[in-house]
Image: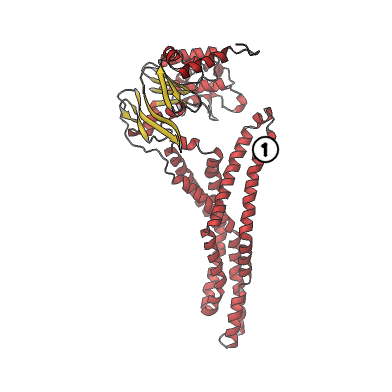
Amino acid sequence: MYIALILSHMAAFEILYNFRVQIAKKLATLSIGYLQNRATGELKKVLVDDIEKIEKFLAHNLIDIVKASLMPVLILIYMFILDYRLAFASLAPLIVFFLWLFIIFKTKALQEITKVYSKSIQRMDSVVVEYVRSIALMKIFNQDANRFKNFKNSIDEYTQWVLEYIDKNSNFYSFIISFISNSILPILAFGVYFYFQKEINFITLLFFLILGVAYLKPVLAISTLANSIFITYEAVNEIDNILEEEEKLKDTEKKEDFENYNIEYENVSFAYGEKKVLENINLKLNQGEITAFVGLSGAGKSTCAELLARFYELKEGSIKIGNTDIKEVSYSFLMNKISFVFQDNFMFSDTIFENIAMGKEFSLEEVIKAAKLAQAHGFISKLKDGYETIYSKSIALSGGQIQRIQLARVFLKDSPIIILDEATSFFDAKNEYKIQKALTELVKNKTVLLIAHKLSSIQNVHKIVVFNETKVESIGTHEDLIKNSNIYKLMWESYIKTKNFGLKGEY
């Protein structure tokens, strides 16, 4: 028994390892857009909770099921040796039990309930993550009650599933348990008949009555594990859904370098489901220039940049780098050519050095040089352990400081294409000027794309592309657009008013 327990745990952990590796490999093939659209709690449930359920079943429940199954099999064999007719009579409860399991697995109503269970757990996980992350914000805006209500609602949803599950299964489950518990009735009926027909003696009848109860007792133990079987079955389905997910990037092994790093959008259209966000976009971004995308929220500028990095699979039109369609080169090769700074700044729980180097083999001197260009060296040097400081919330880096670390990653990677999505939104005027100066030096032989709301940061770029309602409204320099683009002129006037806005509301 002890050896079986060890082997079952070893097998369970091996299967868990393989599952997690397979899921990790699968997630790497899915578009970044797909991952962005999945709730954190949803992926956490699959990667942690569902896999742990499988581990529990394989390491513990499966042994119980094997133990519970082995004894009935041995007893049944012996019963068939004694008298095959009474042995068949004793099989009736067992047949009903397995028929019950079959019906349970095939019943659509129960399948729907298990899906609701899975979704309610996902929602509860997501709400818990959101609730914990937003406690400080909730307290500031006195929204504890409202957010706690969301948290409570997710728990209520799970409770409702439990009640529905009990309601739909309690009567049938009770019937099965009662039927199995009275399993000696068929044996008693046939046994008494055969006894009076002088076909068996009293000892044989008594023996079968005892064995009939003994072999079905372990079956009752299996029935109590039915809930674990259903939950494990649903967990396997959730994992399978990710592994079978079709929304993956069509990749190739081609790694031939581009002729140049001029970028061209040709008749590009894109939609999130039914919602069109880009329509017939035709653009050229030249190597050695800084191009800025501007527009009102939801105009499509960020999506247009994300398509260049293949966050989503493009289905209409094409995007070319140096006359080569980005779909025709390896995704990893493409990623080596592009640096992307996101609006949402992310830091790993690792040293500042590793957060800049991102696992690549760079020297400390190279990392420091990149940090200086990003105006980050000053505050990093003042940290207790400098570049060896482990990042955590406790070291209290500001939003602007984290953005500068993100920019240091870009300067260090030194890729020929750079995409900055609101990369200077947290900078003060002094640091923003220094970063703009560094970018001007960086742009030599590179293609730089800025996505901006702060129009002050793009006045001196080579080209500005104005997006409006899924389309490109106009293209030009700052001076050209002030004269020729009503939307850009309106945005600029709004920016000037905001800049000059006083506390008394004076302009």
The spot of residue 7 in percent (x, y) is 52, 54
Q: Is residue 115 above or below residue 366?
A: below
- Give, as a three-letter code, the residue at label 1: Phe
Q: Which residue is mark 1?
A: 148
* Nearest to the observer: residue 63 or residue 323: 323
Indicate the quadrant where residue 144 lies.
top right
Q: Quadrant of the N terminus?
A: bottom right
Give the x, y percent position of residue 361: 43, 26
Q: Tell me how the rendering is colored.
A: secondary structure
Residue 204 visible in the snapshot:
no
174 relative to 89 in the view: left or right: right
- Residue at x 53%, y 24% (from the top left corner): 352
In this view of the protein, which residue sits in the foreground, 203 or 259?
259
Name above or below for residue 22 compared with residue 230.
above
Image position, residue 292 (x, y; %): 44, 20
Q: Can you see residue 239?
A: yes
Tell me the quarter of the picture where residue 169 sits. bottom right
Residue in the image at 44% along x and 28% along y: 470
Residue plotted at (50% across, 12% down): 433
Residue 320's quadrant in the figure? top left
Q: Nearer the viewer, residue 241 or 463?
A: 463
Residue 369: percent from left, percent from top: 46, 17
Q: Nearer the viewer, residue 493 or 294?
A: 493
Q: Quadrant of the C terminus?
A: top right
